[in-house]
Amino acid sequence: MVSEENLKQAIVDLNFSTISDIVKEALNSGMDPVTVLDSLKSGLDRVGTLYHDKEYFLSELFMAGETMRVALDTLMPALSTNSQFKELGKIVIGSIEGDVHDFGKNIAKNFLTASGFTIYDLGIDVPPIKFVDEAVRVNADVIGISAILSTTQPTSTEVVDELKARGLRDKVKVILGGTGVTQRAINEYGVDAAVNDATEGVNIIKKWMMGRN
C-alpha cells in the first residue's frame, strides 16, 4: 500500500516514469485526494529546500516540477470533485515579448499548480497588452512575467502601465522573474516583486494570496 511518505519521496526522488502509477495506487487504496495532494506538495517543498541548500540544481528542480505535473494530471479528476479542495487564486503567466525562453516559467507554473493555483499560460514572446487582456478575461489575481533577457525586462513596465490605464493596478499583482532580474526592477518597472529564483516567486505569490483570503 502506498503511504503519504511514499508519495512525498516519489517527488523527492524525481520518479517521473512511475509517479502516475503511484498516485493511482494511492487513490485506489482509498487515500483521500487532498491527502495525496498534500503529500506530493510536501515532497515538492523538500525539493525546494534541497535546491536552496545547493544539493539539487536547476535540472532537478525542473524534473521535480515535471514529475509533479504528471502526478497532478493523474490526480485532478479525483481532486476536482472533492469539496475540501480550494483554488488559491488565478495567475496569468508568460515570457514577455522578445523573450522565447520558458525554462524558469515552466518550473514556476508547475510549482504554482501544485500549490493550488489555476494557471493561464500564455507561452513565450507575449505582448504586454495580452497579459492584461487575459487577466481581465479570467479575473486573475496575479500576472507573472518571465524575462530572462535583460533587454526584455523593461517591457514589463508596459504591463503595469496598461493595468493602471484600465483601473486594475490595485487589483492585480505583478511579479517579474528571470535569472538576471534584481530588486531594482521594483522601482524601475513598477512591479510588485522581482525574483531570480522560481521557488522564491512561488513563495511570494502564496504569501500574497494568504493575505487576501
Image: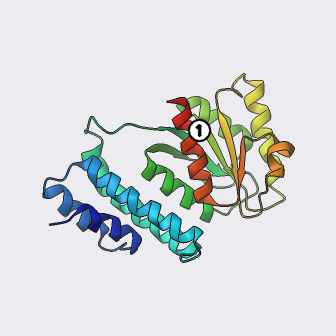
Residue drawn 59% across the image and 38% down it: 208
In the image, farthest residue toward the bottom = 55
Horizontally, residue 130 falls left or right of residue 188, namely left
Horizontally, residue 69 falls left or right of residue 158, namely left
Could you say which quadrant of the image residue 147 lies in? Answer: bottom right
Say if 104 sits above or below 194 in the image: below
Q: Position of residue 38 (x, y in %)?
A: 34, 52
Q: Position of residue 50 (x, y in %)?
A: 52, 71
Could you say which quadrant of the image residue 5 lies in? Answer: bottom left
Residue 12 visible to an observer of this rendering: yes
> Dot 1 lies on which element?
helix
Amino acid type for the residue under numbered disc 1: Trp
Say if 30 sits above or below 190 in the image: below
Residue drawn 38% across the image and 75% down it: 13
Q: Which residue is mark 1?
A: 208
How many residues crowd around disc 1 within 10 Å: few (fewer than 14), some, or many (20 or more)?
some
Residue 77 visible to an observer of this rendering: no
Residue drawn 73% across the image and 42% down it: 128
Could you say which quadrant of the image residue 199 lies in? Answer: bottom right
Q: Position of residue 104 (x, y in %)?
A: 62, 62
Q: Nearer the viewer, residue 134 or 182?
A: 182
Q: Position of residue 160 (x, y in %)?
A: 76, 36
Q: Nearer the viewer, residue 203 or 170?
A: 203
In the image, farthest residue toward the right = 188
Residue drawn 18% across the image and 63% down it: 25
Say if 95 sits above or below 90 in the image: below
Q: Quadrant of the N terminus?
A: bottom left
Say if 116 sits above or below 135 in the image: below
